[in-house]
Image (cartoon, rainbow, N blue to C red):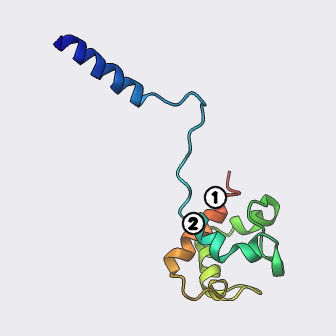
Amino acid sequence: MNTRVSVLVLVCTLCACSSDDSGTHSAAPHPGAELVKANCKVCHAQGINGAPIIGNRKMWSPRLEQGQEVLVQHAIEGFGLMPAKGGKTHLSDEEIAIAVDYMVSQVAP
């Protein structure tokens, strides 16, 4: 009897650890996704005032060459027609860096 219980426990454990049959695995969303959606998407989804559109590799390529540190600095301090922090002064520098990282991740190889 004890052997049957042990086998049952082992089978249940193995089934619980197996992957799903769909073959899809959901990755955790990037922590900047919600920040961008709530604070940056208005301009960066439509290219307002020359803002590089999220996911548009052609628009982001020259910016990526500057390096992420420069992109974060520009986002924090403002650059061109974009005001400091995109006008969202309630955001911390760290939140801005996370948002920039998310946008870069959408075009980075």
Q: 93 above or below 60?
A: below
- Position of residue 80 relative to residue 30, above or below, is below
User: What amino acid does circle 2 point to?
Assistant: Gly
Task: Say which residue label 1 marks.
Answer: 105
Instruction: Please state if 55 lies on the left or on the right of 71 as rendered.
Output: right
Q: Residue drawn 66% across and 65% down?
A: 103
The image's mark for residue 32 is 2
Give the mark toward the camera: 1 or 2.
2
Labelled disc at residue 82: none
- Check if mark 1's residue and mark 2's residue have beta carbons within 8 Å: yes
Name which residue type carries label 1.
Ser
Q: In the figure, residue 62 lies in which quadrant?
A: bottom right
Q: Residue at x 55, y 72 (%)?
A: 97
Asked whether residue 101 appears in the rendered view, the answer is no
Q: Position of residue 38 (x, y in %)?
A: 63, 74
- Pick whichever of labels 1 and 2 is earlier in the sequence: 2
Left or right placement of residue 52 versus residue 89 in this view: right
The image quarter containing residue 86 is bottom right
- Given residues 55 and 80, the one toward you in this image is 55
On the image, the x and y values in percent for residue 66 come to 68, 70
Residue drawn at the location 59% of the way across and 67% of the way down: 34
